[in-house]
Image (cartoon, rainbow, N blue to C red):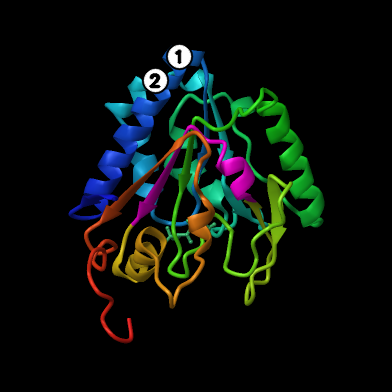
Amino acid sequence: MPEIFPDLEALSQAAAALLAAQAREALAARGLFVAALAGGSTPARTYELLAHLPLKDRVEWDRVQLFWGDERCVAPDDPRSNYRSARQALLDRVPLPPENVHPIFCHGDAEAAARGYEELLRRQFAGAGAGFDLALLGLGADGHTASLFPGLVPPPGRWVWPVRRMGEDFWRITLTPEVLNRSRLVVFLVSGRDKAAALKAVLEGDPDFPSPPARLIRPSVGEVRWLADRRAAGLLGRKKPAGH
Ligand code: 6PG
């Protein structure tokens, strides 16, 4: 069951505290914290809270390695860029060495960008079963996560995959369930009434919503935690009203 919060602010406070605690635990245990950031708008407040006291001083940023769960193939200063969003909310405000930040840059050949990022991740996780200490993910109203959209899920064997979503004039690069399911901890942040049907379908099943891609995220050894606000959790445990 998800942890339910009154609103996005309370959810963000809990998420930021969780990320900082996970970082401290990883650094104490392994001297390194490797995380994948989520895109979209939901995590922005979480990133801001991490970039301010008291949490900012609780993380040894020089031993953090940051990756992205997905990216849109737009310029890094494009408002649609997930890297730009994280840079404005977090990266520009904490002492993270630039060499520890690994954006997904994908100009031109999306397949080449995907393969390049996959090589980077395979080098980072060369040890057997190694994966992210924490992967942060969002949830779309259609049940997508990262850029794993219904009908566009990658074949097995790939860790990073280029995606062209109907109606968008840009490619996307996404991490796949294969690499995300190697994570020690996956944290989903879900906010807003428009996510309620997708969240119900993912957590409780829904014959009308048979296979939301977020259901593919089931770490083989690690844990998944869902942080949702009350509006997003509004349909859980209830019969779906007609037409919802
Ligand atoms: C992306 C995101 C995507 C996002 C969900 C939720 O690049 O679009 O990675 O998976 O997490 O669409 O987006 P919001 O947080 O904006 O609702």
Distance from disc 2 to disc 1, alpha carbons, whole Å, reads 6 Å
Does the magenta portion include 182? yes
Left or right of residue 87: residue 4 = left
Marks 2/1 in contact by CB < 8 Å: the verdict is yes
SS at mark 1?
A: helix
Asked if one can make out residue 145 in the rendered structure from this viewpoint, the answer is no
Q: Which residue is mark 1?
A: 29
- Residue type, numbered disc 1: Ala
Residue sitting at 26 percent across and 81 percent down? 241
Vertical relation: 197 (above or below) 6: below
User: What segment is highlighted magenta in the picture?
Assistant: 175-190
Report x, y in % for residue 141: 43, 69
Q: Quadrant of the C terminus?
A: bottom left
**Front-most of 95 and 66?**
66
Inspect the magenta stretch and tell me whether residue 73 lies in it: no
Dot 1: few (<14), some (14–19), or many (≥20) neighbours within 10 Å? few
For residue 25, the mark is: 2
- Name the residue located 67 percent from the left edge and 22 percent from the top edge: 127
Q: Quadrant of residue 57?
A: top left
Q: Nearer the viewer, residue 200 or 89?
A: 200
* Nearer the observer, 85 or 72: 72
Q: Residue at x 38, y 33 (%)?
A: 19
Check disc 2: other Cα within 10 Å, few if <14, some if 14-19, many if 20+.
some
12 or 160: nearer the viewer: 160
